Amino acid sequence: MTASTHKPLVFIISAPSGSGKSTLVNELLKSVRDLDFSISYTTRAARGNEINGKQYYFISRADFEKMIRDDEFLECAVVFGKDYYGTSRRFLREAEQNGHDLLLDIDVQGAAQIQQKLPDATSIFILPPDRKTLEERLRKRSEDCEEVIERRLIAASCEIQNYDRYNYILINDRLEESSKNLQAIVQTERLQRAGRQLTEEESKTVALADCCRLANVRDRLKRILDSFKPPEASGMG
Ligand code: 5GP
């Protein structure tokens, strides 16, 4: 396949904060070849160890709005009702030229925009095993004050209601297992594109990915969604 005819597979990953998404994304990028990470632009301030051009491009509101006017974004959204975040078209172009696939770490609003524009994109939603675990993780990473943790928990309850818009659901209970499942999803989509007979090993990979398909996780999902309901609602079936 020449670079000019390559149509990148686009993988969208969304998750409530504290789901372990960043760790899983980093592991995936280390273990899978030819997968580019789309570095988003944002108007939020850099946190502790973040470096401009690595996790994000940190830019001013005025610059972000200019990029919107110049139609430089594939999608963009205001996240947590506060800051702009956007995916530059440039990364898709570069993946196309380099014969690579592309990974987007974006919120549910961005995912909906990409699904409109690129209906073949593969979407993956990462979930914590339950609300209590999410709360513990948010406290443990001690990045946020109590008010922000509360806000993130409320945002998580809303975000997870969008789970059924995604092709795959990854319940991040054990990191190592989730990491293998995520790799299997990417490999499965690539195998489908290749469209050839599968080896025994490849069939196992596809089976692993299939376990994460929305239709196959409904029972576990119900328990997770229930754990996010207010106490009076969760007992009502
Ligand atoms: P954080 O500020 O914690 O790094 O990210 C907050 C949220 O913004 C996360 O859910 C993350 O996936 C989302 N996000 C990051 N980059 C983008 C982007 O380019 N577009 C959209 N729509 N959301 C993004």
Image (cartoon, rainbow, N blue to C red):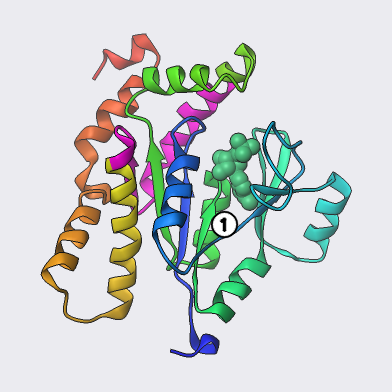
- Magenta stretch containing residue 203, yes or no? no
Based on the picture, tell me whether residue 158 belongs to the magenta stretch. Answer: yes
Residue holding disc 1: 113
Report if residue 229 is visible in the image.
no
Q: Residues within 10 Å of mark 1 (few under 14, many from 20)?
A: some
Label 1: state its secondary structure.
helix
**Percent x, y of residue 236:** 26, 15
Q: Answer with left or right where residue 37 lies relative to residue 233.
A: right
Residue at (77%, 43%) from the top-left corner? 43
Q: Residue at x 49, y 73 (%)?
A: 100
What secondary structure prevails in the magenta region? helix
Q: Quadrant of the C terminus?
A: top left
Frontmost residue, 180 versus 225: 180
At label 1, the amino acid type is Gln
In this view, 207 is above or below 141:
below
Where residue 223 appears, as percent x and y from the top left, is: 26, 26
x, y percentage for residue 148? Answer: 62, 19
Ligand 1 - quadrant of the structure image = top right
> What residue range appears in magenta?
151-176
Image quadrant in which the N terminus is located: bottom left
| Residue found at x 34% / y 15% | 233
Q: x, y (%) of residue 130?
A: 34, 24
Position of 194 relative to 22 (above/below): below
**Residue farthest toward the left in the current orientation of the protein:** 200
Whether ligand 1 has any atom under 8 Å from the Cβ at mark 1 is answered as: yes
Between residue 48 and residue 152, name the one nearer to us.
48
